[in-house]
Amino acid sequence: EAQVTQNPRYLITVTGKKLTVTCSQNMNHEYMSWYRQDPGLGLRQIYYSMNVEVTDKGDVPEGYKVSRKEKRNFPLILESPSPNQTSLYFCASSFNSPVSGANVLTFGAGSRLTVL
Amino acid sequence: GQSLEQPSEVTAVEGAIVQINCTYQTSGFYGLSWYQQHDGGAPTFLSYNALDGLEETGRFSSFLSRSDSYGYLLLQELQMKDSASYFCAVLPNAGKSTFGDGTTLTVKP
């Protein structure tokens, strides 16, 4: 089944304790991206990757790191989490059309993170 | 930067037609996408417009006017299961995407 898999789905942690949220896709998509969603708001893009070893900042990259060493994986790293990073996180992937861009996103089920 | 505006809530009855509007400001433009999200679950792709005009996919259609920086999602023959949040998203370049804050659609019997 074609899918984007995120882990963990739920996590409660404390301020300053490094954590990694993994994301893996099995559709051979070039493009992957991370978003956060806060209550009443849309998804805000954190980082995206057009292909292996190519990453770029989205609208809210502060406090986050990413890496793209393999095509299928795009982990999100919070080096020193703070309470304002408490949010619902979504990973997404897409083929990257030279004409349309990454226009059809497949999302993972989401990871709900609480930082105390 | 990019910004999008869409209504926060829309209510309609089963079987009706509803239109969700989206206006945007963007520094570049690849296209406008629409996504559906049920109760904080994974958003799912509905439609994409890169050129002016109407795109139809079953009961859902999406329209774009690039000159007006405006698009809409049209849902026909509404069903209870269509109650969800709907997001428009603009792609200013091939990789960036900016989402609106979403429209909560409530379908009543």
Image: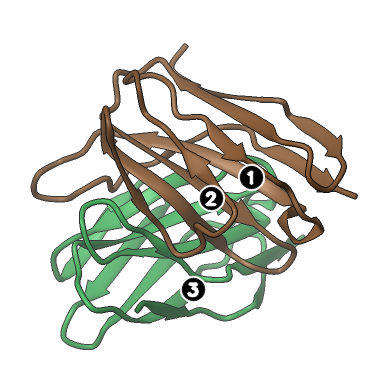
Chain colours: A brown, B green
Res A30 → quadrant:
top left
Q: Which chain carries label 3?
A: B
Badge 1 marks a residue whose secondary structure is strand
Residue B87: x and y in percent read 51, 62
In the figure, B6 relative to B36: above or below? below
| Image disc number at residue A35 | 2
What kind of residue is marked 2? Answer: Tyr
Q: Mark 2 lies on which chain?
A: A
Q: Circles 2 and 1: CB distance less than 8 Å?
A: yes
Pointers 1 and 3 within a single chain: no
Residue corresponding to mark 3: B20
Furthest residue in direction top, as rendered: A1
Residue corresponding to mark 1: A89
Q: Quadrant of the N terminus of chain B?
A: bottom left
| Image disc number at residue A42 | none
Badge 2 marks a residue whose secondary structure is strand
Q: Circles 1 and 3: CB distance less than 8 Å?
A: no
- For disc 3, the neighbor class at 10 Å (few under 14, some 14 to 19, many from 20) is many
In the figure, B44 relative to B82: above or below? above
Estimate the spatial distance between the alpha carbons at disc 3 and disc 2, rounded to whole Å: 23 Å
- For disc 2, the neighbor class at 10 Å (few under 14, some 14 to 19, many from 20) is many
